[in-house]
Amino acid sequence: MLKKGQTSAAYLFLAPFLITIGIFFFYAFARAIYYSLTDFNLFNTPKLIGIKPYVDVLSDPSFRRALSNSLVFAVITTTLQTIGALLMAVALNNKIRGMAFFRSAWYMPSITSSVVITLIFLWLFQRRGVANYAITQWQTYLPYTLTLLGVLIAAQVAQVLWERARGLPAGWFDPALAVISLLIALAVTATLSWTGVLSVRDVAPYDFQYFSDRWISIGGARLLSIPMLVIIIQNTFTTIPTLMLFFLAGLQNIPGALYEAADIDGATPMQKLMNVTVPMLRPVTFYVITVGLIGTMKMFDQVAVIGSAAPQDTLITLAYYVYINTFKAGAAPVNLAAAAAIVLAAIILVMVFLQRRFISSEAV
Amino acid sequence: MTTTLAEVRKNAADLDRWLARRRWARAGWLYAFMLVMSIFFLGPFLMGLLSSMKDNPNEYPPRLIIPQLTPQYIGRAYNLGVQGAGSGWNGGLEPGRTVTFDVSVRSPADAPQGPPTTALFPYQPTSLVAIARQAQATEYATVRTVETGQVGEVRSYRITVDYPALTAQQGEVIAARLATPDENVNAKLPGGQIVAVTLDTPAAQDKQYSLNATQAVELVKAGDKYYLRGPVFERTPLQIDVQRGQSITASTLPPSDRQNFGRSFAYRNITPGVLGYTFNNYRRAFSETTSPQTGRSLFFSWVLNTFLYAFLRVSAAIVFCSLAGYALARMDFPGKNLIFIVGVLFVQMVPDQVNLVSNYVLLQDLGLLNIWGLWFNGLVAAGGVFLMKQFFEGMPKELEESAAIDGAGPLMTFFRVMLPQAGPALIALAITQFQGAWNDFFWPLVILRQNTDYLLTVGLVNFRQLYGGQGDYGLILAGAVLSAIPVIVIFVIFQRYFVDTGSDSAVKG
């Protein structure tokens, strides 16, 4: 084909895309930078006032809170969801029957909207909600659980030692012996409970108020609020399935020969995970972390849904800070909102840049 | 000591069996683990789904076996619906009907032996739309309690709710709504015709000024006159109180609320019908957002809006994203790399909040703070362009080359040759865009200003603001479940594509 004809055709094909991002992205981006240097409040004619809005924003305690909340949230959530997704993917990467069913079932949290899931979590984490009920039950049945675990471990150790004495190569986590240990543990617990040695503990209903002004502090600095912790749990829960698929795709590309070689060298499952799987998954991990950081820094939906149900300081993020300042009643400090938005964009871009610059994405 | 060949073989076979046993056990543990994780990932949804059927989703301790799902109570709810309104599904209370409800009370020897006090109580729903005060069953119906038997300390009582018709006229019974009154009371017939209503008994004339416009009523047509038979009630709320020392041991339906140390039982509706019993919260999501003037349900509008928006987004993506993706994948032109890096990758990194002010002001100036503005705002999704680019890059070049030899221009090549080949990618694109539109929250929240324009996500947040403060989670959970259904259906049908799109972009990205 003629190259000249192709150029005009290509731009014709791209026209709707370029026009849309031109108006709603680049023009908007430029205007945001402009507004962030003016005294705009939605109703007046903007007048340039230099970097004053940035200075104001940086000295706004609410902005500082939002910045710290966003960073803490992004770092913790990205870490948790990356590790969680990797472990889930390793578990799912077994060729057993019915794997497709589990893969679909686990994917469910990823397809429903953040609004729906946040509403369900708000309900689960009420003062007298399902989460607190589960904790109460756990405390009530603690004697049973501890007995079960204790007997299980004791039985497993005894059996492994015995098998080894017979010259068989039993590992500490030998699955067949663990089944027998579990049966023994169940039988012992049932007997003890039947004879009345074990009984439930009488505990008061656990009624922790999650959506209140409580903080985890380090050295007096308020680091992470409890409502934010609930959102971290919720976000990890919803993101793990998506990220898990990325890891699964990566896992299926690892040559089986590597694991066979590791088997010949007598590597334990843990060693295989750390020395074969993790290094081979490096490109995927890199991608997952990038996506995770961008996504978590932008977190908005959950905060907006919870809204007034939790004290604002505990949940405010940069994205939410921009939103509430843009739509504040009366003369809204839109210039501050724009400045905060630019700061947020800059943080994300710097994060991605640093990651690209200093962390190798190549598999080793 | 020597080992024979037979012994060696036997030992090897033993070891094989030993190892096989381990493989089986390992698979067993794996399945157990998978099951536990499935409960973890699906548990919150299942709990939400089950609890959305409860009268009180906040009950403590939470139960998994709920009366709303047991055949026995569903049957009784049906039966009571038939008694109250002749409809086992919708229930309600119509004039001229009598409803019986049984309750058993235990009165130990040292406690009072009297019958329980029973009364209907008023119920006015909270709502997102202006609802005029509705007529209450308690003002029209009478309740009487009769002892029907005694077994040991437990006496059973039959409570009869009697709602006499306000007119003695016989004739065709018509369901209508009251309209704005002038010198006499008017009603709007199902056909839209407005007629004057005759109040021919003192009982009916008594209520003349307490009935608001839009109240659902029954009329009797006799001759060419319409007589008021009485208002139709959506529910019959009943309260039963016993004295100190007594306790209620059983009732036809379980109570919605127990108060006063189990001595005061409230039944929000003793004529529910199946819909009003098992799916009460779902029905409320529609009925409590229905404006009586227009008869339109806000929740229903939100569902339609969301479908419309999803449809618009998907259509735009199929045309524009594939065009742009194809150009970036297969055509050669100056600025291609720049457009890809800045227009596709950079755009996805920058948070939406940066464009918030400008886009809001722009759409406001254009008078587009509605679903169309929302559509233009995200007309061509950068993520969709990326997906299509990846797909077209993987297609064989021969197709285009042969098209070019045949003298087809770029547009012809694209629409006649390339696009028909892109079926699977287009389905994946459509699904991701549908899901994205259905779950979209930030831009709808910013751009949509009228509550009739809302999408489901934004509407649900309004539910939370209105009902969450009172802890009325039944409605919130029901709304959440309803709004999740379409995506879940799509997911179940097109699972393969969800999984594929996810992993594709990972490997290549």
Image: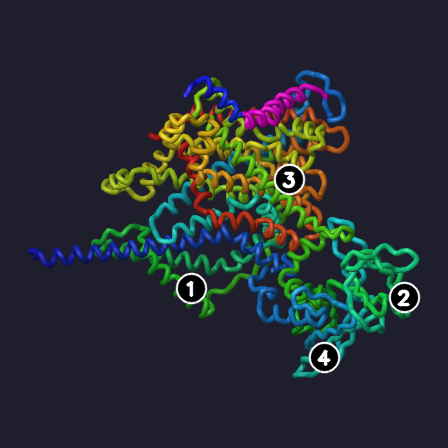
Indicate the secondary structure of the residue bearing disc 4. Answer: loop
The residue where tag 4 is placed is B110
- Between label 2 and label 1, give the one nearer the viewer: 2
Q: Which mark is residue A189?
A: 1
Sequence order check, earlier mark of 1 and 3: 1
| Residue A331 x/y as whole percent | 76, 28
Please, is residue A31 above or below residue B106 in the view?
above
**Cβ–Cβ below 8 Å for labels 2 and 1?**
no
Q: Nearer the viewer, mark 1 or mark 3?
A: 3
| Tag 3 and tag 4 share a subunit | no
Dot 2: within a 10 Å radius of its alpha carbon, few (fewer than 14), some, or many (20 or more) residues? few
Chain identity of mark 2: B
Give the image quarter of residue B423: top left
Extent of the magenta region:
A15-39
Same chain for marks 1 and 3? yes
On whether residue A162 falls in the magenta region, the answer is: no
Outermost residue to the right:
B183
The residue under label 3 is which amino acid type?
Ala
Estimate how packed mark 1 is, as few (under 14), some (14 to 19) or many (20 or more) residues with alpha carbons within 10 Å.
Answer: many
- Res B206 label: 2
